[in-house]
Amino acid sequence: MRPSGRAPDEMRAITIETGFTRHAEGSCLIGFGDTRVLCTASIEERTPPWLRGKGEGWVTAEYSMLPRATHTRGQREAAKGRQSGRTQEIQRLIGRSLRAVVDLKKLGERQITLDCDVIQADGGTRTAAISGAWVALRIAVDGLIKSGALTEDPIEAQVAAVSCGIYQDTPVLDLDYDEDSTADADANFVLISGGKIAEAQATAEGACYDEEGLLRLLRLARIGCDRIFAAQLDAVKK
Amino acid sequence: MRPSGRAPDEMRAITIETGFTRHAEGSCLIGFGDTRVLCTASIEERTPPWLRGKGEGWVTAEYSMLPRATHTRGQREAAKGRQSGRTQEIQRLIGRSLRAVVDLKKLGERQITLDCDVIQADGGTRTAAISGAWVALRIAVDGLIKSGALTEDPIEAQVAAVSCGIYQDTPVLDLDYDEDSTADADANFVLISGGKIAEAQATAEGACYDEEGLLRLLRLARIGCDRIFAAQLDAVKK
Amino acid sequence: MRPSGRAPDEMRAITIETGFTRHAEGSCLIGFGDTRVLCTASIEERTPPWLRGKGEGWVTAEYSMLPRATHTRGQREAAKGRQSGRTQEIQRLIGRSLRAVVDLKKLGERQITLDCDVIQADGGTRTAAISGAWVALRIAVDGLIKSGALTEDPIEAQVAAVSCGIYQDTPVLDLDYDEDSTADADANFVLISGGKIAEAQATAEGACYDEEGLLRLLRLARIGCDRIFAAQLDAVKK
Amino acid sequence: MRPSGRAPDEMRAITIETGFTRHAEGSCLIGFGDTRVLCTASIEERTPPWLRGKGEGWVTAEYSMLPRATHTRGQREAAKGRQSGRTQEIQRLIGRSLRAVVDLKKLGERQITLDCDVIQADGGTRTAAISGAWVALRIAVDGLIKSGALTEDPIEAQVAAVSCGIYQDTPVLDLDYDEDSTADADANFVLISGGKIAEAQATAEGACYDEEGLLRLLRLARIGCDRIFAAQLDAVKK
Amino acid sequence: MRPSGRAPDEMRAITIETGFTRHAEGSCLIGFGDTRVLCTASIEERTPPWLRGKGEGWVTAEYSMLPRATHTRGQREAAKGRQSGRTQEIQRLIGRSLRAVVDLKKLGERQITLDCDVIQADGGTRTAAISGAWVALRIAVDGLIKSGALTEDPIEAQVAAVSCGIYQDTPVLDLDYDEDSTADADANFVLISGGKIAEAQATAEGACYDEEGLLRLLRLARIGCDRIFAAQLDAVKK
Amino acid sequence: MRPSGRAPDEMRAITIETGFTRHAEGSCLIGFGDTRVLCTASIEERTPPWLRGKGEGWVTAEYSMLPRATHTRGQREAAKGRQSGRTQEIQRLIGRSLRAVVDLKKLGERQITLDCDVIQADGGTRTAAISGAWVALRIAVDGLIKSGALTEDPIEAQVAAVSCGIYQDTPVLDLDYDEDSTADADANFVLISGGKIAEAQATAEGACYDEEGLLRLLRLARIGCDRIFAAQLDAVKK
């Protein structure tokens, strides 16, 4: 029995409020239950130094948690003077995930930065961030197309992510904080609409698992990502 | 004529949504027009080292701007590895302003940290932050009183802040970004309910002003803060 | 009764020794009583990146306190690896104050940096720094005029600063350390010769004040700055 | 055809030289072909602050690449003043992997730090580091047992890691640099002797893969890790 | 012929103004010609963590150059966020030199920090710093003896330092900036009254030297240090 | 009697294994007894900004100690975020020493960086680093000559370094850790084949010495460096 009363393959409510801030070229506030992440897409008409003159663009991401997004206040990374290993690991994952569905040549010599700031955390912040970042990116790129700056769509598919884990011997979908802090294994899957896997990260600090376990977690992830893909399309259409 | 069409002594719409996040002991999303700041109050049952054993508490603040709160994306301070002088100046101001209305002895040996994170910026972010931080603090302290942790209220008054400036030779209240970037003088007043001044900061990079100018700006600030005091009480009552 | 025996509107002795160091284009050691600040003006024939090609110059300032300028030794900021919020706040104030009296277009594409290093502290270091920085700047600019690099004087007026405060219910001028550490309110005024205000910063952590209090502090500041203006002219003439 | 002429399921030569340095409680120089990583295990009779008094130990890891371990010289992280996100991600992975096979309660209140310094890089440095770190750890713990400091063995199994990827449409084992820089997908598997998976990380920036692809990569990883498990035992016996 | 017209074995004028600042337990402004260094000694009744409870004291030093002590303005180390290698090398040298003449057991469990801040630089700042630091230390320790905190004098001798070099094939004493920047070899000697050597550092980037050259430089250093020892005693007696 | 049983003028075994890593243009693992330092030379076809367009090259060095090169584990400098003063002092010394034997004009507009990473420490790491860095440099420059990039040899001589000290009143050569930690005086000499001195650094924290003592240490250094010069030539010939 999950603490939230959810079925093992049941996701939390997905909410996506687009246009949450007005300066960014694309933005949304995405919620997976009580987890809420503000995702913005910022377009800059320049690329990183190592890409200049190659006729390609770049998509990158930054991630941060507001100090009191969590149960107890965490120290602000800007005050500490360095981003934690966890933060860097997550923002690298978000960037890779989004680049997996963008044709950087079609994007042209511009950079899109996806800022994912966690307003409230209840487990699954990185997966919500990836899923919301796609929506912000989609809106920003639609703007480029509408303005004529792009004639071909560089986004090749949708990308979404969800966490799965083994909670009291049962594989469950979309762990919330109560489950996450006691789960035996914890996996994050980044999936692409159409069925391919962009990234799979499965970790076990306590109990370990095998092929069958990995596939069961992946099967749950497919259920969750299908729900997210639908919510992304709904949000973008509005 | 102001770009927004407002009268010289007219504030922007003040919106205060309490309980915007659920983990903090007090929180609100405050809006002065398009400027929106998330303010949270976090209670910790310990004080900074230099206060230990003195039977007093502490109130402090941190301030940050999300990278894309502004028209063009700013670099994330956590990525740069240091907080800018502007950030530090503002968070010191917020802390002093709130301490001006708190009896630290009555607060007891605990620290309340007010995190003010700017979600969207359109001028006046520090004044909105101070005004919203009071609401978050009020809610957090009400919780301490309700739980019996405090028997006497350490908050002695309300505190609010607003900016004023001289725009095209006219003193105006509550500058938005369009006015702020071209104003000749720029002042921030932190006022206390009952009429006292907690802090006055008036700067003129271009044109300068005199006693009469300073008093006219202060008179506008009184009008604005009275509006904010009313909005704070409304928000807290809900 | 003030600890120093001074009258409420009496400044400490003002001493200004020009040419204290020989490499800088302008320099002086300014004293407000026991507070002593070394101010140097350094001219560089280049401007910050964001000003390049605009035909304007820039005036900026840096401030530091020697570790043992104070009663007890403070940690060296270079050893800590970061400048404190206080340091950054003060150096931003010094820079703004000086720019208030300089026509940056007339200065041409060059930068003048005012380094204000506190040799000994006894209250009022930032106001002494501003007042001394003007002398260093005046000497440096006189050099540019004499050498023919400038044909028009970019300095439009004198600028000086002084602190005032409410000490045992009496408004007093030019607080020394003993007064500063126990004063109820503390204000710094940056005034321009001719009567305008460049900057007013009045803070009250304990007691607060009102319009009348603010004006009384400002009146004292005018008395003090008139004395400083005279001392600046004397120093520069030598 | 692989650049090295290896069969798709063929690992590079595994070399493990134990006792490579003499101060560490355990050490080895591990080679996967031209990739060479120095792994040392350092025992300290204290635990991190958050574990004190809990009767448990801790196993952690640090990773670094010598500046000229690579084809072109990289900047030294100590000179840059910060560890890269890649470095932090890898050292977190090494630590988690080793903890997956250690009973921290049996280890007692001590910390073992595994330093993995890449002397020469040719792809697969993180997997060689994990595999070598186990050997260093095994030697260090054997020392604790021999000295009587431990009566029960806290190491529950062997752990090893290997990379796999899709190179020119063929799943291949143990990517070297030439393959790694052009592979379509890249996966790192951390396996435990006995068959369980400790960690699986599969990434695709270009082409993506599906369940079948993931399982084929995992099957290769099993072949590779079996070879590494044998080499570890050989090394430790000497 | 030296640029300054001095004889090869002629030192610049040595000036030592004690009590230059009033908060430090000992202070002086030392001048070797145009080089001027403010040296302060600060006593703290605590020792570094690694010395606690050992019944010994510690003597340490910090060194800094004001940004415009030099011909062209240097960047402030506090603004850069790190001390340069040169700064650290010099402050380590100053500390070692002073410790060479102090009996740390007799000093008792206290730390004396010698801050050496270069007000104006014209070559030889580190040697002036060492020589002036001894004066500040002497004054501070005299205060401890006078107050009864110390009954036995922990200072066993005087220490002084001077630079020598080979300028246009001639060994010369006490290099000024003009000589220093073109000298073929550059040596700093730290000598102890009575004749012993505390530290010798001789460097040759261009031409190199041999035993005879080293001894000739050392002979010059003895002449210079004798002059400094006399000036130190004069200064302390006043 | 020395702890190692060596005669006072006896060096430890010198071992030099060239080509220890394969990516660097030159590399060796040098051993002075149990001290082992990996030295690599990296050629880059660009010079530091302050040298550009001057038709000269640059030789520089970086030094680091692996965390467990020593008896007890030291904190990794990359994790601390700054290089220690000791590290910076040593790497500056290595760079100066190598530049003493290189004609930078003949090197042309390229930079050679010598990375010296201490794999195992037993005293004398900086002197082994200098001696090994020359070997790596020699190999790298030979490569430039062989490829035709250089027609004239920019290396004018050999450079080597060794430590000497006064151990139990006896001057001894090539201190190991046991001697180094208890020696009264400690000197490092950098000598050039042919007999000149590039750098002499002699320090005495406890006992001090005089001219005769300095010369006796230097005489030992000549014995040691002659042995190292021979070993360098042997290594390079292979």
Image (cartoon, coloured by chain):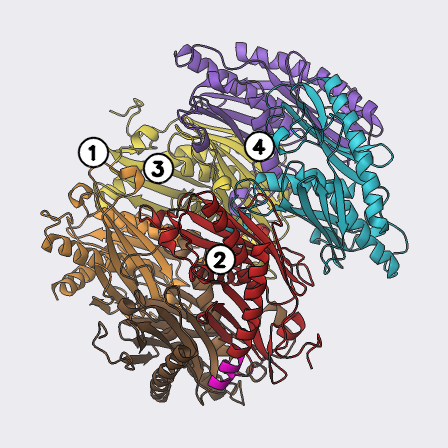
Chain colours: A orange, B brown, C red, D yellow, E cyan, F purple
Marks 4 and 2 close (CB-CB < 8 Å):
no
The quadrant in which the N terminus of chain B is found is bottom left
Q: Are marks 4 and 1 on the same chain?
A: no
Q: Amino acid at mark 3?
A: Ser
Reading the image, the residue beneath label 1 is D169
Q: Amino acid at mark 4?
A: Gln
The answer to whether residue D82 shows anywhere in this view is no
- Mark 1 belongs to chain: D
Quick one: F155 or F129, which is closer to the camera? F155
Q: Are marks 1 and 3 on the same chain?
A: yes
Query: Does dot 4 land on a helix, a strand or a loop?
Result: helix
Question: Is residue D143 left or right of F215 when viewed as pictured?
Answer: left
Q: CA distance from mark 4 to mark 1?
A: 47 Å
Q: CA distance from mark 2 to mark 1?
A: 45 Å
Which is closer to the viewer, label 4 or label 1? 4
Q: Are marks 4 and 3 on the same chain?
A: no
Reading the image, the residue beneath label 3 is D163
Count all numbered tags in the image, as a single digit. 4
The magenta segment: C207-217
Residue A86 rendering spot, x and y as whole percentages:
41, 54
Q: CA distance from mark 1 to mark 3?
A: 16 Å
Q: Amino acid at mark 1?
A: Asp
Residue at coordinates 25% horizontally, 55% vertically from top-left?
Answer: A42
Marks 4 and 1 close (CB-CB < 8 Å):
no
The quadrant in which the C terminus of chain B is found is bottom left
Reading the image, the residue beneath label 2 is A80
Quick one: B50 or F105, which is closer to the camera? F105
Residue A228 rendering spot, x and y as whole percentages:
20, 61
The answer to whether residue F80 shows anywhere in this view is yes
Reading the image, the residue beneath label 4 is F91
Query: Does dot 1 land on a helix, a strand or a loop?
Result: loop
